[in-house]
Amino acid sequence: MRFQVIVAAVFWSGFVESRKVRGISSSYKRFYKERKSFLCIDGSKIIPFEQVNDDYCDCEDGSDEPGTSACPRGRFYCTNLGFRPHYIPSSRVNDGICDCCDASDEYNSPAHCQNTCWNLGQKERAYVEGQMRTLDEGLRLKQQLIEEGVLLWREKQAQLRELQQVAEDLQIKLEEHRRRKHEAERLKEQTLKALEAGDSGLRHQNRTETSIFQLLDSNKDGSITVDEVKTKVVLVHDEERLLSEDEALGLLGGGHQIDLTKFRRTLWDVLTRGDSVKIKDTPGSDDPHLEAADKAAEWEATNLKKVEEAYETVNMEISDLRKKLAIDYGTDWEFLFLNSQCYKLKVYEYIYTLCPFNQVTQKNTAGTEVSLGTWGMWAGMPKNQYSQMVYENGEPCWQGGSRTTTVTLTCGTETALRSVKEPSKCQYIMDFQTPVACQPVLKQRGIHSEL
């Protein structure tokens, strides 16, 4: 009898030992050293140690049943040697489904679980090594882009200074051309007034009967006809009305045409009086002095317009450049190279275009383009604010607000738009891969997570 008791005690001791180590991480093993009593880890209760892993839940936190499914709040620790250890709910222990890759959760079930931890570990290590290589290459490319960004930033600053100097020079030229144009118009006006103040009935200086005759003789046949008079001569007080046939005949002395001799005795006398008819052309329009003054005024006006257009163009360039330089391109200007670039991705029947720091668009197969937002701001977490971009105030949605797009930047060796989704109506998310999104801290985490 005593022998049987001893054998039973040895058996029970081994059973407790097996219970106490199952489903426990190494950091918690100190709580499960075999002794007379067991203190629930939350400190709520003390129970006999024999009740640990007895398939009955005594502790509220489930700490007395780490290796069984008795406690609803219990957790089972998968050691998973060769892979990543993790916890599973204790309700999954011995449920016939393999949850731990080392099969430790199905120690007393009909399920035939294989230990796949080594294979999983190999795959993960290969993946981590690939990520590490990508990160190393991404960081190398990022450093190049930082150096290029610094140079590009300096070039943009120098370009701005040059444009500002050009604008200052054009401002001086603008004032000079305005002065010249004003002076030319003043001289033209003075010339015109001087001509109009002349004693001649024609109000022309340096004109003779011969020059007026030649002016009226349009076909240069040596005579002036009724039609030529009607074309070139008008009434002083009604310039818009054409002369009638009889009025023209009267000016020609009753004949249908006259030569220079008869012109002196008829039409010339009427014209010199200047009280009834005059030559249709603007007074003094064929005067060489007025023509020169008029051409000078036109020349200065043309030159002024050219300078004004150049000044406006330069100021627009300065404004655009200032807007670009006001954008936050990162602490080392590493994102500056993205400005003026666009990246496309086709998803089903749509082509999405991301133009960093500008806009996001969507185009369908019919060619209709819709704005999904314009550049708003950086929206990453405080530790890495440059991990997300927000583009807002896109075209309005039907029965909704404006379209917006959130762009998440991820580390990669190439700069490309990788994915586009619409998780909710008119709210788009994009995955944008670029070397400048690589962070050294990721490399450190990768080292710590190696197996």
Image (cartoon, grey):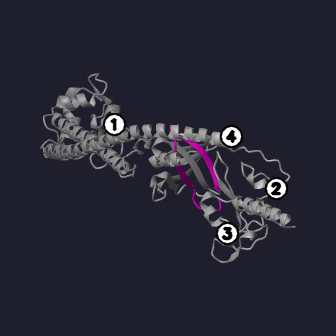
| Quadrant housing the N terminus | bottom right
| 11 to 219, vertically: above or below | below
* Residue 197 seen in the figure: yes
Q: Position of residue 383 (x, y in %)?
A: 45, 57
Write down the residue under mark 3: 35
Amino acid carrying label 3: it is: Arg
Write down the residue under mark 2: 108
Counting residues from the start of the chain, the first of labels 3 and 1 encountered is 3
| 376 to 302, vertically: above or below | below
Amino acid carrying label 4: it is: Asn
Tell whether label 4 touches label 2 (CB within 8 Å): no
Asked if the stretch drawn in magenta spans residue 409, the answer is yes
> Magenta residues, as a range?
397-423
Residue at 24% across / 26% down in the picture? 259
| Quadrant housing the C terminus | top right
The residue nearer to you, when weighing 418 against 47, is: 47
Residue at 54% across / 51% down in the picture? 407
The residue nearer to you, when weighing 180 against 50, is: 50
Q: Nearer the viewer, mark 2 or mark 4?
A: 2
